Amino acid sequence: MVPLSGEARGHLAMLCFSALVAGSFSLGSLVANEMAPLALTAVRFAIAALVIAAVAAATTGVPRSALAAPWRYLVLGGTFAAYFVLMFEGLKTAPPVSAAAVFTLTPMVAALAGWVILRQVTTARTASALCIGALGALWVIFRADWSALRAFEVGRGEAIYFVGCVAHAVYIPMVRRLNRGEPAVVFTLGTLLAGCAVLTVIGWPALRATDWAGLRPLVWVTILYVAVFASAATFVLTQYAAMRLPSAKVMAYTYLTPSWVILWEIALGHGAPRWLVMVGVSLTIVALRMLLRPDPDRPRAGRPRGTRAPSSGAPPAA
C-alpha cells in the first residue's frame, strides 16, 4: 500500500470533520431551546478538554515547550468559542436554512483570512472549486427549492451568525500562524482549556441558572456528542489539516456538511430529500475532486515569521 502524503491525510481529516460536524446540526436542532448557548458551549469545551487531556497523556504528553506563550491559546480558544456561542445566539432568531446558507460563506472568508494572515494565495482552480462547492451547498441547503432561495432575507440572527462564521474562518490560518511545533493534540488541549476558562468566566451566570438535573437524556446525549465528536475530535482534525493544507481548502469541506446532514436526517427517521437535491450533492463532490488535485500553479511560500516546523512528521508550513 502506498503511504498517503501529508496533503492527502489533511484531506482525509477534513472529510471526517465534515461528517462529525453534520451530526451536531441534526442532534443540536432537537435540543436547541433547552440550554443557554454560553452554558452549552462551556460544558462542551470542558468535556472535550478532559478527553483530549487523556489522549495527550497516553500519547505525546505535554512538552514543556508547549507552555510557552500561553496567550496563543487564549487567542485561539476565544476565537473558536466565539463561533459556537454566536452560532447558537444566531439560531435563536435565524431559521436553520438561512443560517446554513450563511455558513457556506465561511470558505470564502477563510481564503481571505489565509491571505491576510499567512499570505496564502488561492489559485484560480481552487477559487473555481470554492464557487462550485458554494453553489452545490446552497442547492442542498434550500432542498432544490427556488422559491426558498428567492425568499432568503438577512435578518439579525443571520448577521450574528455571520460574525461567528468570520471567527471560524480566521481560526484556521491562526492555528498555522501560532503553532510552534506542538503536536495537534497538545495544541488542541491548550485551545480547549483556554476557551473553557474564557467561557466559564463570561458564562458563569448562565451555568448557575441551568437546571442540570432537569435536563432530558437527549440533551445529555447531544452534549456528549458535541463535546467528544463535534468538539474534541474535530478540533484535532482541523488543526491537523490546517498544518498541511491552505486555509481555503480546509474550510472547503464545510460544503460537504449539508450532504452529511441529509444522511443524518435519514438515519434519524426524518425522511430523505427530493432527488433534485442530489444535483447539489454532485456539485460539492465535483468541487472536492478539484481540490484533491495538487495545484501546479500554487507558489511556494516561506514559513510565516515566528513559526517553526511542525512536529510529528508534519511538513513545514507552506
Image (tube, grey):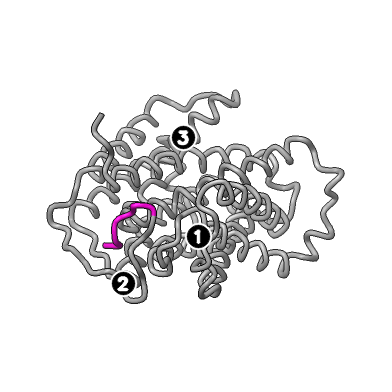
Q: Earlier in the sequence, mark 3 or mark 1?
A: 1
Q: Would you name the residue on which mark 3 appears?
A: 260
In percent of the image, x 39 and y 31: which residue is there?
Answer: 277
Residue positioned most to the left:
297
**Is 30 located above or below residue 303 in the figure?**
above
In percent of the image, x 81 and y 42: which residue is there?
Answer: 215
Q: Earlier in the sequence, mark 3 or mark 2?
A: 3
**Rounded to the nearest whole Å, what is the CA distance between mark 3 and mark 1?**
28 Å
The percent coordinates of residue 119 (x first, y second) are 27, 70
**Rounded to the nearest whole Å, what is the CA distance between mark 3 and mark 2?**
34 Å
Q: Earlier in the sequence, mark 1 or mark 2?
A: 1
Badge 3 crowding class, 10 Å Cα cut-off, few under 14, some 14 to 19, many 20 or more, is: many
Q: Would you name the residue on which mark 2 appears?
A: 304
Q: Which residues are magenta?
A: 312-318
Give the side of residue 27 with respect to residue 130, left or right. Answer: right
In percent of the image, x 41 and y 52: which residue is there?
Answer: 240
The answer to whether mark 1 and mark 2 are in CB contact below 8 A is no
Please name the amino acid that badge 3 sits on: Trp
Q: Would you name the residue on which mark 1 appears?
A: 187
- Examine the image and state in which quarter residue 15 appears: top left
